Image: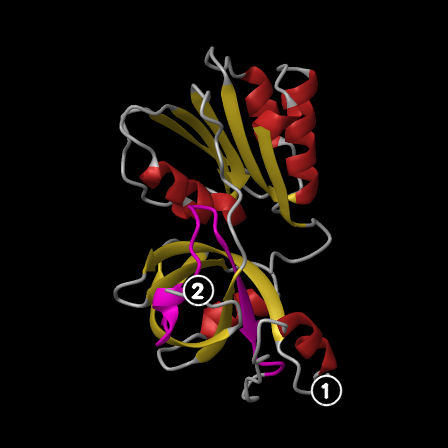
C-alpha cells in the first residue's frame, strides 16, 4: 500500500478531557490507513484554518511546503507539530493530545474543538530508536512530552526497563498510564512556577542514582530544559551523545503551541 505524503483533510470525531490541561482530539479521514506511522513519538503536522470560521485550504501534493508558501497569507493555514498519541489504521482513527495553556493556535483549537471540525494532518516521522544494546531507558519531559512518554511506556516489552520523570503543574495534571513492571514513573509538581520557568527536573535528576548498564535517553519539552538535561547527562553522567535523543518542543518566551 502506498503511503500518503501530502496533507490529508481530517474530521474531528471526539474530544476527550484527559486532565485539567490535556485534551485528546480524535480525528478520522478516508486515507488514514495510508498514514506513515513509525513509532511512539511520531510527529504529525496539523494544519488549522487561519482564523476562526475560515475555510481550510490545504496543499494538494507531496510538494506541500512550496505550495503552502505560495498560498495567499489570508488563506494560508496555520502549521503546528504534535505527537500522535493513538493510531488505528484499520479504523482510520488518530488521536492527538493538546496541552491547554497559553494562547497558541493549537491550544485554542483544542479548547473549542467539536465533532465535525476539520483540520489537516501530515505524517512527520518518529525519532524514538533505542539501540539494540540498550539495557535501560531514561524518559524525561514536561507535559508537552507526556503524550510521547506515555506512548513509549505503553509500547515497551515486558522485559524492558525505564526510568521516567515528568514535570506537570500538580497532581491534577498527572495522566493515568497503565502500569509496566519495568518502569519507575516519577511525577514532579512545579506548583506556581510557570511552565519552563524552573529547574525542578534537572535538580531531581542530579539527586537520583541512575541504574547501571547502557542507557538510552529520550528527552523533550521546553527548549532550555531539554538542553540542560542533555548537558547534565553527557558531562555529569557520562552518556555518549549518540545515546541521547533530545528535542525542544517549545521555548519559554512562547506559549506551547
CA–CA distance in space, label 2 to label 1: 29 Å
In contact (CB < 8 Å): disc 2 and disc 1: no
Residue bearing the label numbered 2: 3
Viewer-proximal residue among 211 and 41: 41
Mark 2, residues whose alpha carbon is within 10 Å: few (<14), some, or many (≥20)? few
| Secondary structure found at label 1 | loop
Viewer-proximal residue among 169 and 63: 63
Residue bearing the label numbered 1: 72
Answer with the quarter of the image where residue 87 lies.
bottom left
Residue 47 placed where, x, y %?
56, 73
Query: Which colouring convention does the figure follow?
Result: secondary structure
In the picture shown, does residue 95 fall above or below 120?
A: above
If you read the primary sequence from the N terminus, does the residue marked by circle 2 or circle 1 appear first? 2
The residue segment tinted magenta is 25-51
The answer to whether residue 207 is visible is yes
In the picture shown, does residue 233 fall above or below 116?
A: above
Q: Nearer the viewer, mark 2 or mark 1?
A: 2
Answer with the quarter of the image where residue 230 lies.
top right
In the picture shown, does residue 155 fall above or below 162?
A: below
Q: Is residue 170 left or right of residue 16?
A: right
Amino acid at each position: 500500500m502506498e503511503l500518503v505524503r501530502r496533507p490529508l483533510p481530517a474530521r474531528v470525531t471526539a474530544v476527550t478531557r484527559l486532565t485539567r490541561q490535556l485534551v485528546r482530539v480524535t480525528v478520522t479521514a478516508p486515507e488514514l490507513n495510508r498514514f506513515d506511522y513509525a513509532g511512539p513519538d511520531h510527529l504529525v503536522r496539523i494544519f488549522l484554518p487561519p482564523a476562526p470560521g475560515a475555510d481550510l485550504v490545504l496543499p494538494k501534493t507531496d510538494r506541500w511546503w512550496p505550495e503552502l508558501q505560495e498560498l495567499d497569507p489570508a488563506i494560508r493555514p496555520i502549521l503546528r507539530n504534535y505527537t500522535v498519541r493513538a493510531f488505528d489504521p484499520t479504523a482510520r482513527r488518530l488521536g492527538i493530545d493538546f496541552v491547554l495553556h497559553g494562547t497558541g493556535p493549537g491550544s485554542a483549537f483544542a479548547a473549542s474543538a467539536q465533532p465535525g471540525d476539520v483540520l489537516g494532518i501530515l505524517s512527520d516521522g518518529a525519532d524514538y530508536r533505542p539501540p539494540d544494546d540498550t539495557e535501560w531507558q531514561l524518559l524525561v519531559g514536561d507535559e508537552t512530552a507526556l503524550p510521547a512518554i506515555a506512548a513509549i511506556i505503553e509500547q515497551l516489552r515486558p522485559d524492558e526497563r525505564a526510568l521516567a520523570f515528568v514535570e506537570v503543574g500538580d497532581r491534577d495534571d498527572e495522566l493515568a498510564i497503565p502500569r509496566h513492571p519495568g518502569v519507575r514513573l516519577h511525577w514532579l509538581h512545579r506548583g506556581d512556577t510557570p511552565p519552563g520557568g524552573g529547574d525542578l527536573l534537572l535538580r531531581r535528576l542530579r539527586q537520583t542514582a541512575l541504574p547501571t548498564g547502557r542507557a538510552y535517553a529520550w528527552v523533550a519539552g521546553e527548549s532550555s530544559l531539554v538542553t540542560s538535561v542533555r548537558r547534565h547527562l553527557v558531562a555529569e553522567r557520562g552518556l555518549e551523545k549518540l545515546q541521547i535523543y533530545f528535542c525542544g518542543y517549545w521555548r519559554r518566551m512562547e506559549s506551547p503551541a
